[in-house]
Image (cartoon, rainbow, N blue to C red):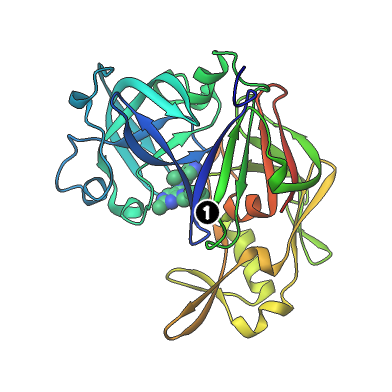
Amino acid sequence: DDPTNGTAPTPLTNYLDTQYFGEISIGSPAQMFNVVFDTGSANLWVPSQSCSPFSTACFTHNRYDGSRSRTHIDNGTGFSIQYASGTVRGFLSEDVVVIGGIPVVQVFAEATALSAMPFIFAKFDGVLGMGYPNVAIDGITPVFDGIMSQHILKEEVFSVYYSRDPQHSPGGELVLGGTDPDYYTGTFNYVATEEMGKWEVTMKGVSVGDRIMFCVEGCTAVIDTGSSYITGPASSVSELMTTIGAQLDESGYKVNCELVKTLPSVTFHLGGQEYELSHEDYILWQTELEGDVCTVTFRGLDVPPPTGPIWILGANFIARYYTEFDRENNRIGFATAV
Ligand SMILES: CCN(C(=O)c1cnc(C)nc1NCc1ccco1)[C@H]1CCCNC1
């Protein structure tokens, strides 16, 4: 009988509570890559052996070499993906991808040009999009859809646990086909995905302390496992930072570490539930040589219409609320993370 009872776990590495990634292999024999499992996109890309030596971000990461894989299938179609934070360009190839021990023949992009920003800071090699097929570039069937069509999963869901302190082992866990009760308590509360085909929900308000300050008329929230922080419309986040007494410097919003324990909670109203983040959840407390630095893990980001304006709930939210992404019922479930 199936040793995994229809579920397939992948342990994740937690890099400074800001990057979470796990290992997959591509090709035969296996070529290993660290990838972000990203609900904010739907394509798989890894750096290519044929990337330009001038692309530093490419050169400092593991690179896929099709000529060394006996299961490689040429494609060659051009590929380009634009994130708010950077650009990836390359060409398509096809090969066997193994994720959580499950093999799937997959079309993916070999990146030949990676923008230095932000990918020179990436501890991961590539991105494995866990989004819906209709947001996939070039109409490529996403990895999870390729796995669902094998009918081996107990449920057509995947779940994500992100640990909160980098020393914690494992740094996180992706489960294909179910959830892992070791990493959450209580029951799941579900929110329907707002628009068919995106890990997006309707948010009914954002409160600071007990006052609804933003998204009062309702707004859209993307649950993005591939984003480190929470982002909101720049004007709203700027007002939120003023309220908590944070100052913007070149690397984000900072607060005086002495005042952290007096900071109010920020609460996100999703479905029938209030999801509170306390200062423990939204302050990144780093002890540097020149003293402690307390970074607020919120960023202003204006996503242009028609996609935006939106809030993006990233790793700091998921670290507090264990998240189940349910393709069977087009809904997202949240439970309190352990
Ligand atoms: C992966 C590209 N992303 C990043 O925000 C991003 C960029 N650059 C670096 C260095 N890290 C990033 N994310 C780290 C991380 C891992 C897990 C949680 O956050 C976003 C782009 C939009 C779609 N969603 C993903």
Q: Please, is residue 57 above or below residue 80 in the view? A: below
Residue marked by disc 1: 228
Horizontal arrangement in the rendering, residue 238 relative to residue 128 (left or right): right
Q: Nearer the viewer, residue 220 or 255?
A: 255
Q: Is residue 67 rendered to the left or right of residue 114?
A: left
331 left or right of 170 in image: right
Query: Which quadrant of the figure has residue 51?
Result: top left
In the rendered image, the vertical position of residue 82 relative to residue 279, given as above or below: above
Please tell me which residue is depicted at 56% across the width and 26% down the height of the picture: 132
Q: Position of residue 260 (x, y in %)?
A: 66, 78
- Vertical side of 294 occupied by 2: above or below: above
- Nearer to us in this view, 151 or 55: 151
Q: In which quadrant will I find the N terminus?
A: top right
* Observer-nearest of 22 and 315: 22
Using the image, determine if residue 19 lies above or below residue 218.
below
Mark 1 within 8 Å of ligand 1, using the beta carbon: yes
For numbered disc 1, what is the local secondary structure?
Answer: loop
